Amino acid sequence: MTDARVLLDTAIATTDEMGALGARLAAVLRAGDLVVLTGPLGAGKTTLTRGLGAALGARGQVSSPTFVLARTHPTTSGPDLVHVDAYRLSDPVELDDLDLDWDASVVVVEWGRGFVDGISDSVLDVEIVRATGADASAPDDDADPDDVPDEPRRVIVTGTGPRWADAVL
């Protein structure tokens, strides 16, 4: 897909701002939308998804699905939120094996680049870039990735496909 366009390029300074960005994205999402989150460990992918889930009215705590691979969060109204973590997947076929409800849900896939190709003709790609040297302060394997200190991030949201051709964030 070559019809990608940047919809938003912004600086995020705090975890609260990252959650607010998730809520902002939720305002334009609808059933069938696919969101791919890319960024290093501790970048804020789950924090953004938590804000998105809160704005969609997702029931239950939105947390990283690293060990279960995917969680479906029913919402109080509107489409369910399906939160996927593709970090431990080795092949895109494994994502298909999860038997997700792509059409009736908002599907958010952390670490999804290269795994969602061909699933939808429209993708909202969210790349979170931590400041230079920030990876050194990433949590270790035993830490909760959401317990990282506030630090500046750059977030680039790119829409690809007909769904995002005229979108405004």
Image (cartoon, rainbow, N blue to C red):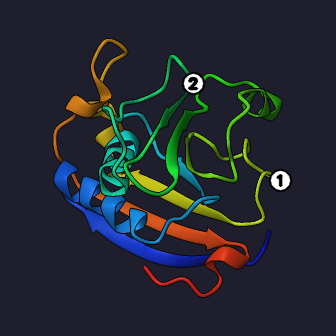
* View extreme (top): residue: 142
The residue shown at (30%, 42%) is 134
In the displayed structure, 165 sits above or below 16; it is: below
Percent x, y for residue 39? Answer: 47, 45
- Residue placed most toward the observer, 162 or 7: 162
**Quadrant location of the N terminus?**
bottom right
SS for callout 2 = loop
Residue 118: mark in rendering: 1
In the displayed structure, 61 sits above or below 130; it is: above
- Residue placed most toward the observer, 154 or 45: 45
The residue shown at (34%, 68%) is 24
Give the total number of marks visible in the rendering. Answer: 2
Can the viewer see residue 14?
no
The residue shown at (83%, 53%) is 118
Percent x, y for residue 36? Answer: 57, 51
- Residue placed most toward the observer, 108 or 58: 58
**Quadrant location of the C terminus?**
bottom left
* View extreme (bottom): residue: 166
The residue shown at (27%, 18%) is 143
Q: Give, as a three-letter code, the residue at label 2.
A: Leu
Q: Which residue is mark 2?
A: 69
CA gap, disc 1 and disc 2: 20 Å
- Residue placed most toward the observer, 35 or 137: 35
Q: Is residue 109 left or right of residue 128?
A: right
Q: Give, as a three-letter code, the residue at label 1.
A: Gly
Can the viewer see residue 157?
yes
